[in-house]
Image (tube, rainbow, N blue to C red):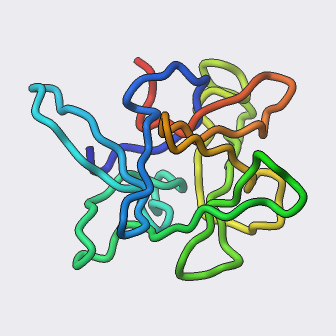
Amino acid sequence: RNGIEVTLWPCEGSTRQEWLLNVQKQLQVFGHDWLGAPTTSCLAKKADKDFEGLLLTTCSITENKSGLFEVLPVEGSQSKVHIVSSNNKKSCLVVQPLRNNGGAYGARGGAQVNIGSCDHPWAEWGFDSSTGEITSAAFDALGEVCLTTGWPF
């Protein structure tokens, strides 16, 4: 749903972790609201000023709130990709660790996602287009995490 934060959590295979790079080059996620009505949202193109991370927003191209992205291989890697902003080829989707170094699952529970330099290792992702999982090994010793809509309450 629009306005929900996008964070990193251990991968669990739910629809909150299934992403589609649609034909408009938006990262789109599908779900249901609390009444069971289907919802569709896209990843925003810039961080929310209060949350300081990316949120879900409308997929309407005319409203110009969603990011447009390209998935490009990381040089020298067979499995990692950069999720590059179509507006600025030097800007990528990046992990933004929590300031307190932890959440419900320690460092890998609830880290934010933002737009930042493609040169940082935290800009490297795994993207499985068949399952829709977007994964990060930013917290390597603690295990892989997935791009997730919201928080696991």
Quadrant where the C terminus lies? top left
Q: Nearer the viewer, residue 49 or 141?
A: 141
Is 71 displayed left or right of 14 in the figure? right
Q: Residue at x 49, y 55 (%)?
A: 54
**Residue 79 appears in which quarter of the rendering?**
top right
Position above or below: 148 against 76: above
Report the front residue among 124 and 6.
Answer: 124
The image quarter containing residue 104 is top right
Which quadrant of the structure image shows residue 100? top right
Residue 115 falls left or right of residue 26? right
Image quarter (top left, top right, bottom left or bottom right) of the N terminus: top left
Q: Where residue 22 sits: x, y (%)?
A: 37, 59
**Residue drawn at x 24%, y 75% as measured from the top left:** 63
Residue sitting at x 56%, y 67% = 70
Taking 77 as reference, is 153 above or below it? above
Answer above or below: position of 27 versus 24: above
Residue positioned 64% across, 38% down in the render = 135
Image location (x, y in percent) of residue 145: 65, 30
Q: Nearer the viewer, residue 58 or 128?
A: 128
